[in-house]
Amino acid sequence: MKVFLTGATGYIGFNVALRLRSAGHEVWGLVRSQSKMNLLKQNEIHTVFGEMKNPDSYRKIAEEASLIIHCAVDYTKGHESMDKLTVNTILEAGKKGPQPKTFIYTSGVWDYGSSNGLIDETTPMNPVKNIAWRPGVVKSVLNSKDVKGLVIHSGDVFGKSGGLTGTWFSGASNNDLKVIGDGNNRWPMIHVDDLADAYFRLSESGLSGEDFNIADRSRYTVREIVEAIAKVSGYSGKIKYIPLEEARRDMGDYAPALALDQHVDARKAVRMLGWQPKFNGMVDEIETYYEAWKAYNNLK
């Protein structure tokens, strides 16, 4: 199967690309930096040099692919318009080439807002302000008549280079470990390899119009995770718990997302995809994850 990915050199996208290539698929990755092209080629992933803001740079390969995965995710200013442009381009490309195409869109559990009990795929979306637009994009993918649209709502990703959780490792290494809120909230977590496996299983499922929460079974609070990081890193300072309103003044609408308290149910993926998380939780092997993060950042 010919696969095209956006965000192919990013934290999630690169690991998804490796998983699909290991299954024998022909994988093409969008890359905007010449310096990162070699990384993909070393791993038998073809490169498409271009950018999401320039749809003509990747439109042809999107039209030729049987599977398209949009993995490029960030929360910087302007991402809303970029994301919508990319999704619209992919949906339009779905009308050409191999039919029907499968399109997997990467979303996240922030779509749901804080928990009032267990969150599953039937829970109404109540996104934090910085992604208030995303449920509309999710709906457009799931309801598309031009592709077999699928959506992954990912938990907070850990493992290897660290993703968002890497900011805690970085804080510990720089003697400036900070938490937004009081730390008693729970983040739904997922190891990057378990997440990549969910994409793989979904890509071969034949399903359409379905969304899936992907999170492990751990229920650690942010405070428990950060205290484990402090211990394993030899952090000698005081962990700083920053009140949300104070953080909002510095970080804007991004801050409330980091203070969400969520309990996410991933049993739909277990039931329909045969997916199971193999990693037990970030705290369980915190030393392994800290050492991996240091290696990725060339730290001793």
Image (cartoon, rainbow, N blue to C red):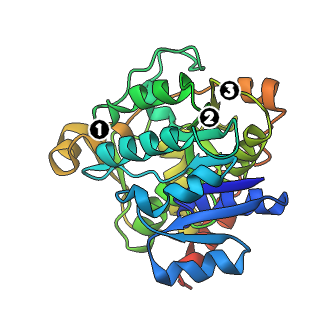
Residue at position x 28%, y 32% in the image? 129
Element on which disc 2 rests: loop
Labelled disc at residue 130: 1
* Residue assigned mark 2: 219
Question: Which residue lies most toward the left here?
Answer: 249
> Is 241 on the left or on the right of 41, as rendered?
left
* Residue assigned mark 3: 208
For the residues carrying marks 2 and 3, which lies nearer the camera in this image? 3
Amino acid type at circle 2 is Arg
Per the model, the C-alpha gap separating discs 2 and 3 is 30 Å
Badge 3 local density, few (<14 within 10 Å), some, or many (20+)?
Answer: some
Per the model, the C-alpha gap separating discs 2 and 1 is 25 Å
Q: Is residue 12 visible?
A: no
**221 lies above or below 55:** above
**269 lies above or below 126:** below
Q: Position of residue 189 (x, y in %)?
A: 60, 42
Amino acid type at circle 3 is Ser
Element on which disc 3 rests: loop
Question: Which residue lies most toward the front here?
Answer: 96
Lower position in the chain sequence, tag 3 or tag 1 = 1
Badge 2 local density, few (<14 within 10 Å), some, or many (20+)?
Answer: some
Q: Quadrant of the C terminus?
A: bottom right
Lower position in the chain sequence, tag 2 or tag 1 = 1
Residue at position x 80%, y 46% in the image? 278
Element on which disc 1 rests: helix
